[in-house]
Image (cartoon, grey):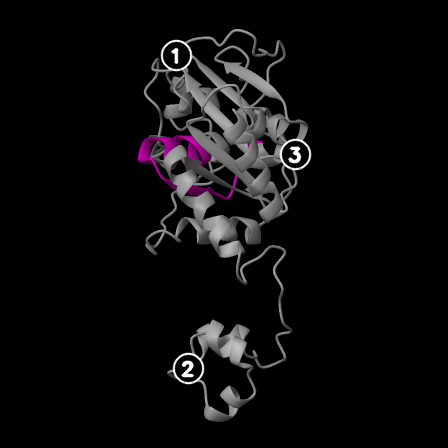
Amino acid sequence: MGTWVAVANKCKEILCLEGSPVAVSLRKELLPGVEIPKERFTFCQFVQQARVKRKVLQATENNIICCKGASTLGLYDPPRHVMSGKRDAGRKVKDIQAGQTLQSEIPRITAGVFHYVIVSALERTPVDPDVILFVGYPAQIWRICQSAVWKDGKRLSFSTSTSQGVCGDGVVVPYLTNGLNISLGCTGMRVFAGYSEHQMIVGLSVARFWEMSEGLEATSAGEYTYPIPYETYEATPRLPRAWTIMREVTKEEREKLSPEILKKLELDEC
């Protein structure tokens, strides 16, 4: 698993992450030697323990206390009182009908396909993951998304209803689409698992993760670094950093730049 160690450390270094990226592996069979907690936790607590404490844990239908999370991950069929809308009506949404719509539109893995979920710090994952999660501040998530665009420049689209934010938005959507998805989180994530109100989540399939990690390293070699070097909002943006946003570079402005900067910014023909 040396590759995962190297790429996890690189991501932590470039993004200045608080904690580790989290590897999630959906499995049909038990993996011997991986801890199965006797206590029950929400899935977002499993993720938090992996991220903060670097734990390697095996979640099952019996030790995930949140039925919404366990059923979204496909460990069993969603309970009737969840799909009926009763759990959310008057609390999260206006009424029963809205509750039914809320749950019916949440992407789910077919029940019974998987029976175990291994959740671990990426650098300690005992198996190749299916999805990799990052928990970070908006600017860190922005850098991940910016890096995911590196390969082809295509726009990103996100799917959320603010319910099942870690299990559904963070894991299931990237898994089913083989893509990337941003989550604003959910009630369980904030209330039970202690995620900061300033934090967001992004989940990536393994294929999308490798594309992103290539872009992360490539863009970090230039001016796109984190923490972000910013200029005051009361000063006019200056060259050379302002080059990409300017309509044109005047002769007077060019004369103030060194030949090295001119060459770097490819302004010789402007």
Q: Which residue is mark 2?
A: 268
- Residue at 45%, 54% (x, y): give it: 146
Tell me the kind of residue under disc 1. Answer: Lys
Task: Describe the element under mark 3 as helix, strand or loop.
Answer: loop
Viewed as shown, does residue 109 lie left or right of 213? left
Q: Which residue is mark 1?
A: 28
Tell me the kind of residue under disc 2. Answer: Asp
Q: Which quadrant would residue 38 be assigned to in this image?
A: top right
Q: Which residue is mark 3?
A: 194
Task: Describe the element under mark 1 as helix, strand or loop.
Answer: loop
Q: Which quadrant would residue 206 be assigned to in this image?
A: top left
Q: Is residue 73 above or below residue 93?
A: above
Q: Position of residue 110 (x, y in %)?
A: 32, 20
The foreground one among 196 and 9 is 9
The foreground one among 77 and 209 is 209
Q: Is residue 33 above or below residue 245?
A: above
Q: Is 183 one of the magenta-colored residues?
A: yes
Q: Position of residue 120 (x, y in %)?
A: 56, 24
What is the C-alpha distance between the residues marked 2 and 1?
A: 59 Å
What is the C-alpha distance between the residues marked 2 and 3?
A: 53 Å
- Residue at 53%, 37% (x, y): give it: 7
Q: Earlier in the sequence, mark 2 or mark 1?
A: 1
Q: Is 257 one of the magenta-colored residues?
A: no
Q: Is residue 164 visible?
A: no
- Residue at 52%, 24% (x, y): give it: 1
Magenta-highlighted residues: 168-188
Tell me the kind of residue under disc 3. Answer: Gly
Q: Residues within 10 Å of mark 3 (few under 14, many from 20)?
A: few
